[in-house]
Amino acid sequence: MSGDRQDVRDSERPLALVTGAGRSAGIAASVVLGLARAGWDVAFTYWTAYDARMRWGVEPGAPGELQKKVASFGARTLAVEADLSDPAVPAQLFDHVERELGNVTALVLCHCESVDSGLLDTTVESFDRHFAVNARATWLLIREHGLRFRGRHGSGRIVSLTSDHTAGNLPYGASKGAMDRITLAAARELAHLGVTCNVINPGPTDTGWMTEDQKADLVRVTPLGRLGVPQDCANLVTFLCSAEGGWVNAQLLQSNGGLG
């Protein structure tokens, strides 16, 4: 058996559900591919309306291309367009994934609402939307996972991606802080299921949003002298979801090359 498939046999692939994989350059897409390469079947979500609001715009065909790449690793896959600002969607999403692929073993939360604004100019509407997507949906997705988990004790996984960028990005950073607490609380509340729950802060990651000046500044202040790339975070997610990562629990992990 090759190293890429050492965790499970092809006929016994566990299922991961990854949120927020609408862009090929994003961290979530690398997470999806990393898990597929490591022996997982992978369902993932995307939300076109969010990308349409952002300066990078919609990437037509990205979910379909990601599915093809996942399938090339011998994995079953499912792409679901999901508006996680709707509180009814998390349960519907799990229903859909279970119906098509079976029970979820790992839940990886990469989705976000992120629109820059500060303490003085954030609108109530934007604040509420950030908390609906980044905090409330996290709680509802984790709750569904906890209610439905049927795997062996110690095999379940929850990983959330966070950020500490709050100044000048108030609703995003504040709602991600709430995400942290919800995920880490789940490590205690889901202990009877043996589901590990961890948070990763990947730091600034080059997914196409940085200016050239920002890139140069970040390279200067990062001890390893380079930018973070999506695969850096995906490597840690794959480890945390593996059997070898099963003793890491209730942690907020900085995976940022030593950026202070």
Image (cartoon, helix red, strand yellow):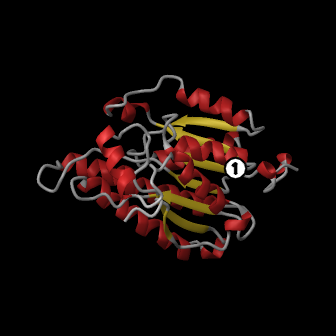
Q: Please identify the residue farthest to the left as the structure is shown.
A: 120
Image quadrant occupied by the C terminus: bottom left
Give the residue at the far right of this rendering.
1
- x, y percentage for residue 232? 55, 52
In the picture, residue 135 is in which quadrant? Answer: bottom left
Q: Amino acid at mark 1?
A: Leu
Q: Is residue 141 left or right of residue 74?
A: left
Residue at (40, 45) in percent of width and height: 86
Residue 19 shows in this picture: no
Of 141 and 67, nearer the camera is 67
Residue drawn 41% across and 49% down?
A: 87
Residue under label 1: 15
Residue 211, quarter of picture: top left
Q: Position of residue 149 (x, y in %)?
A: 66, 61
Residue 218 coordinates in the image, percent (x, y): 36, 52
Q: Which residue: 35% across, 64% down?
A: 177
| Image position, residue 19 (x, y; %) | 52, 46
Is residue 21 among the parts visible in the rendering?
yes
Q: Is residue 212 left or right of residue 101?
A: left
Helix, strand or loop at label 1? It is strand
Between 37 and 139, the residue placed more toward the observer is 37
> How busy is the neighbourhood of tag 1: few (under 14 within 10 Å), some, or many (20 plus)?
many
Above or below 175: residue 69: above
Residue most extreme to the top: 60
- Residue 153 as seen in the image, left or right of residue 217: right
Q: Is residue 241 depicted above or below 215 in this figure?
A: below
Q: Is residue 237 left or right of residue 54?
A: right
